[in-house]
Every structure is written in structure tokens, then in C-alpha cells.
Image (tube, rainbow, N blue to C red):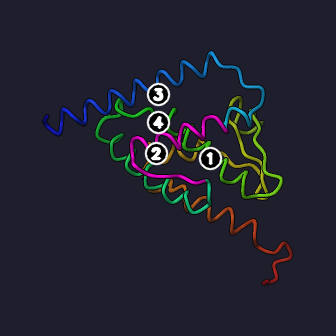
Amino acid sequence: MKTSTLVALVVVILVLGFYLRAKYEKTRQFKTAGEFTQWLATEAVKDAQENNHVSLDYTPESIQKVEQILGDLHDRYVKNHASISANGLGSAYGAYIGEVIRRSEPGAKWERDDPVGGEKSYPIIWGCGRSYPMAWCYHRIVNGPEDNVWVKYRVLKQKRDEPKNGSPN
């Protein structure tokens, strides 16, 4: 089988898989934003393993692996916008990043809607305020390396860890 045929087949399978997942999500009822985002994060973990042969373990360092996956998705998106579901994949990988934050930051929690982000923006509320990792990942896929999610996470984490009074630790 030619490489181009194999690539086309993989793309069709990915698109069909995310279509079926999206259809399933519409029929499934989630009681909380956290329940939905946790489910969506597990979909990202599955996608990373099945389609990228990458294991994600919910550690902050694994966000670097997500950045690499999003970089590959961006490259494919640039070649053919229709080959990538930027919304679906961005939401799944964004939910994963948000789950990393929620699991590693005391008091972090998901919300469904937000006055700034709007309905179904799914911000994660944590020590840095409100973050929108689903939007981060969407923009990384569409815009490229200038929207590096690992850099965004590290900058926010550093900001959170800085002393409030401006004096060094």
C-alpha cells in the first residue's frame, strides 16, 4: 500500500472516530463540567496512544508531549484544513491539560461557562485565575508554534509561584 493511501486511510479513520465520539457525547449526559472534561481528557489519552504512540500520564511534564502532538496536528492542518478537527482535538487535548492542572494544583476546578470565555468555554480555575486550555490547544493546532501550550503552562505556573510581595523566595 502506498504511503499516501495509508495516510489518507488513517485520516479518514481519525475523522470518523472523532465524529462518532462527538455523536456519542451529544447523547451522553454529563452531570458536571468536571465529569465531561475528565471523560474528554481520557479520549485525548486514547488518541495519543492509538494515533501517536505516546503515553500520557497526567504529570505536568506530559504537557510537553501534548505540545509535540499538537505540533504534528498543526503540520497536518496546514497541509489540509479538512483533515484535522481542530475543535474536537483541541478540546480533547485541552481537557487533558486542564486535568493535569486540576490534579496537580490544590483547589483547581472546572467550570462549564465563563463570563469572559462564554458558554461552554470550560475554564479551569486555579492559582493563576482562569485558564482556557481547550482554546490554547485549538489555537496551537490552527496557528502553530507561537501558541505553544507548554510555554503557556510554564509561564502561568511561574506567575503563580512568584511571591506576592515582589521579594525573592
Q: Is residue 42 magenta?
A: yes
Labels 1 and 4: the sequence-earlier one? 4
Q: Amino acid at mark 2?
A: Ala
Task: Measure the alpha-carbon separation of dots 1 and 3.
Answer: 19 Å
Q: Is residue 2 magenta?
A: no
Mark sitting on residue 18: 3
Task: Measure the alpha-carbon separation of dots 4 and 3.
Answer: 11 Å
State the SS at label 1: helix
Task: Measure the alpha-carbon separation of dots 1 and 2.
Answer: 17 Å
Question: From what the image shows, is residue 22 above or below residue 106?
Answer: above
State the SS at label 2: helix
* Label 4 packing within 10 angstroms: few (<14), some (14-19), many (20+): many
Q: Which circle, 4 or 3, is nearer the viewer?
A: 3
Mark sitting on residue 48: 2
Residue ID at (72%, 25%): 30
Q: Amino acid at mark 3?
A: Phe
Q: Amino acid at mark 4?
A: Ala
Magenta residues, start to end? 38-57
Labels 2 and 3: the sequence-earlier one? 3
Mark sitting on residue 133: 1
* Residue 123 x/y as whole percent: 71, 42
State the SS at label 4: helix
Mark sitting on residue 86: 4
The answer to the question of whether label 2 and label 3 lie on touching residues, with beta carbons closer than 8 A, is no
